[in-house]
Amino acid sequence: MTVQVGDTIPDVSLTYVPYNPDEELQACPVPVPYKLHQELKGKKAVIVAVPGAFTPTCSLQHVPAFIEQADKFKAKGVDVILATAVNDGFVMNAWGKTLGGKDKVIFASEGGSGFYEKLGLTLDLTAKGMGIRSERFALIVDDLKVTYVGVEPAPGLTVSSAESVLEQL
């Protein structure tokens, strides 16, 4: 079953590397848990999931728009913007640094937590050599409850774009 408005997000632990302005691109700090229920309780969050870090649409359009418009999200009451993909925490950290995510967006790995499966939003890209990934989607979550679900019906950006999500806040 696919996640719906009103559902509680799954209680899973993603992995991430907390932002450090002094960290070099080549640094490889060990990712730490990002426990969704613990971190997002009492907060408004936008969760953006992409099929993969360092992939064209994800890196050139989708996630950069959330970084560029982070202040607009904050002005609308969003406490956390979380970008997630199946890539490991090391890759997500490097991707966040190359995109200039800094402290605007948290880059977290799904890391086999079952998050996408529990949301019903997996995407099988095995035929393209990429394995099981996530659908491209965006969720708005308020105190762990889903208030918006935007799952892309086809390649491209419509309902999960930064602009579309901002309109829903």
Image (cartoon, rainbow, N blue to C red):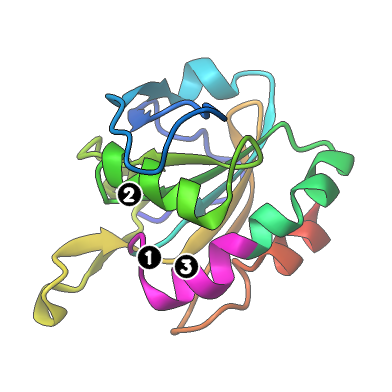
Q: Residue at x 44, y 66 (%)?
A: 136
68 relative to 39, above or below: below
| Left or right, residue 96 beside residue 101 | left
Closer to the chain start, of discs 3 and 1, is 3
143 relative to 98, above or below: above
Judge depth for marks 2 and 3 and give the one in front. Answer: 3
Give the alpha-carbon distance from disc 3 to disc 1, as whole Å.
15 Å
- In which quadrant of the rendered view does residue 16 lie? top left
Judge depth for marks 3 and 1 and give the one in front. Answer: 3
Q: Does the magenta stretch include residue 53?
A: yes
Q: Which residue is drawn at 75% across and 38% down?
A: 78
In this rendered view, identify the residue nearer to me: 159 or 28.
28
Mark 2 touching mark 1, by CB under 8 A? yes
Q: What amino acid is found at the position of numbered circle 1 in the picture?
A: Glu
Residue that mark 1 sits on: 135
Residue that mark 3 sits on: 59
Residue that mark 2 sits on: 116
Q: What amino acid is found at the position of numbered circle 3 in the picture?
A: Ser
Residue 94 image point, x, y percent: 37, 46
| Left or right, residue 86 beside residue 142 | left
Q: Which residue is drawn at 38% across and 65% down?
A: 135
At numbered mark 1, what does the secondary structure look like: helix, strand or loop?
loop
Magenta residues, start to end: 52-64
Residue 101 image point, x, y percent: 58, 47
